[in-house]
């Protein structure tokens, strides 16, 4: 079958099974991130401002626009210090880090439909229990947030494991980028709606509303989603053949041994791990701490705070979707090779966020420009998904979930450390100068991650990821993007699409 010219020709196939999967992954990620990030905004309403160090609080008024001065003073229910807030915001990531690698293994053992759906289900229950835990005490809400992270850890590894079975090679960038972009809309919803809910219905409503919505999503997920194309009852034969022939049946077969030693010796895995840590450090610094910066330095009130903070996630979503589409378009049209696309987008997704984050910190009290530069910084970080985060499935399609679990473990560590660094840096002096240091550190980490990825990046399937016995038994091979690129460059004028398969068979 011609992979580049595959088209659906039935009215009933207008919405393909893999696109339904992408849509429900999108909403699953959206729900996961609303439950992850609602505390970042709700905590502003939960905490009594008198619980902060008075010197730090006064120093936040240097722009003369602090919300605590220009508005009626509102006090929260809990006297937590800035450092305690940092610990609480990082609690999710302590649990999240633990279940990344096991999440990839669980996906292979039980299937992503059960693992992914079960993760969201337990997270919904824990989210609705969060207000009760907060009233029980700091230790109780810390435990609740830790367990929330623990249950949400398998979400990304299981999704990457499933895309290893469902995403045709020439559609990986846009399918994975679209499904992952639900996380951006989850952040937007959490940031914008949490402020409104806190003001109108009380901070407890942030947890009840998002928890109930996630429970409703679970019902449809378990009814509509299947682990592999071959077992899907509603997939067309044309689409099933297209997916299986382009990915090969080897990817879906179980019983293979995980080459742990080869994985941890691979320079590509180390490059992706370092890149994932550094990218997440910058993203999570903004994700968890931006509402505090908007409130205590830029002086936005609670409602405007959530809206302004959500602009970063909106920019991130826009760039993730656009560059995910552009990546596949340029590869299909032979405009750029896969390795060139990955390098360009990795550079855009790691170096430009560093530049604009520094500018956002240095702009002073100009709130408009500060929000603009921070939004642009966050937006360009979205290029990292079609840049190097898709690469997990390229270099090891059968182990995509496990591989992402490994690298996302490092990313989760960044998520747990960055709020602590912010809390420690602002505990005594909550000033613009301290935040400039925070942004400068994040920018430096972005640059280090970009260099590490570019030095090690490959797009062909790694030798340790190949199942030679299955290849001999099934007479099938993984579609190698280097083969596509080489044939395309050599035969754009006179070569046929079948040359791809002849070339690959020869190789």
Image: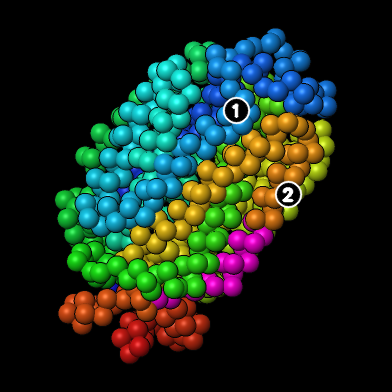
In magenta segment, residue 450: yes
Residue 440's tag is 2
Q: Is residue 225 visible?
A: no
Pinpoint residue 413: horizontal percent, then vertical percent. 51, 49
Q: 332 left or right of 469?
A: right
Circle 1 sits on which residue? 306
| Residue sticking out furthest to the bottom | 506
Q: Are marks 2 and 1 in contact (CB under 8 Å)?
A: no
Q: Which SS class for mark 1?
A: helix
Pinpoint residue 71: horizontal percent, then vertical percent. 72, 13
Q: Which SS class for mark 2?
A: helix
Instruction: Give the residue drawn at x 29%, y 61%.
Output: 165
Quadrant that contains the C terminus:
bottom left
Mark 2 nearby-residue class (10 Å; few <14, some 14–19, many ≥20) = some
> Which of marks 1 and 2 precedes in the sequence?
1
In magenta segment, residue 365: no
Instruction: Give the residue drawn at x 71%, y 45%.
Output: 439
Instruction: Give the residue drawn at x 30%, y 34%.
Output: 121
- Which residue is nearer to you in this view: 467 or 84? 84
């Amino acid at each position: 079958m011609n992979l580049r010219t595959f088209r659906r020709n039935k009215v009933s196939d207008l919405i393909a099974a893999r696109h339904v999967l992408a849509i429900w992954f999108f909403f699953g990620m959206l729900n996961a991130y609303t439950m992850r990030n609602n505390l970042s905004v709700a905590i502003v309403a939960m905490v009594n401002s008198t619980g902060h160090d008075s010197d730090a609080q006064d120093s936040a008024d240097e722009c003369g626009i602090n919300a605590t001065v220009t508005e009626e003073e509102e006090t929260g229910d809990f006297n937590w210090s800035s450092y305690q807030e940092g610990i609480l915001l990082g609690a999710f990531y302590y649990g999240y880090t633990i279940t990344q690698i096991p999440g990839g293994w669980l996906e292979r053992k039980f299937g992503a439909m059960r693992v992914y759906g079960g993760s969201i289900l337990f997270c919904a229950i824990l989210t609705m229990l969060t207000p009760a835990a907060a009233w029980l005490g700091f230790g109780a809400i810390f435990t609740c947030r830790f367990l929330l992270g623990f249950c949400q850890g398998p979400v990304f590894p299981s999704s990457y494991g499933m895309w290893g079975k469902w995403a045709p090679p020439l559609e990986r960038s846009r399918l994975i980028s679209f499904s992952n972009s639900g996380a951006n809309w989850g952040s937007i919803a959490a940031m914008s709606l949490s402020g409104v809910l806190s003001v109108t219905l009380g901070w407890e409503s942030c947890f009840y509303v998002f928890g109930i919505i996630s429970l409703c999503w679970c019902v449809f997920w378990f009814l509509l989603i299947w682990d592999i194309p071959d077992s899907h009852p509603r997939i067309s034969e044309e689409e099933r053949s297209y997916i299986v022939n382009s990915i090969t049946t080897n990817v879906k077969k179980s019983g293979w041994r995980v080459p742990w030693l080869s994985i941890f010796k691979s320079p590509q895995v180390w490059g992706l791990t370092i890149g994932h840590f550094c990218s997440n450090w910058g993203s999570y610094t903004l994700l968890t701490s931006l509402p505090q910066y908007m409130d205590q330095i830029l002086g936005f009130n609670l409602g405007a705070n959530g809206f302004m903070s959500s602009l970063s996630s909106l920019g991130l979503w826009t760039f993730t979707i656009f560059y995910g589409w552009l990546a596949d378009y340029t590869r299909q049209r032979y405009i750029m090779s896969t390795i060139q696309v990955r390098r360009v987008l990795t550079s855009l997704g790691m170096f430009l966020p560093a530049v604009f984050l520094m500018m956002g910190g240095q702009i002073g009290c100009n709130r408009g420009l500060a929000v603009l530069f921070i939004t642009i910084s966050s937006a360009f970080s979205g290029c990292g998904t079609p840049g190097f985060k898709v690469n997990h499935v390229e270099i090891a399609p059968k182990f995509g979930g496990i591989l992402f679990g490994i690298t996302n473990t490092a990313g989760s560590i960044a998520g747990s450390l960055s709020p602590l660094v912010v809390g420690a840096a602002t505990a005594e002096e909550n000033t613009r100068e301290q935040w400039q240091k925070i942004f400068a550190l994040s920018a430096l980490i972005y640059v280090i991650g970009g260099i590490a990825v570019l030095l090690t990046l490959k797009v062909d399937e790694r030798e340790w990821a190949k199942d030679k016995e299955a290849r001999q038994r099934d007479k099938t091979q993984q579609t190698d993007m280097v083969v596509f690129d080489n044939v395309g460059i050599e035969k754009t004028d006179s070569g046929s699409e079948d040359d791809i398969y002849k070339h690959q068979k020869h190789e």
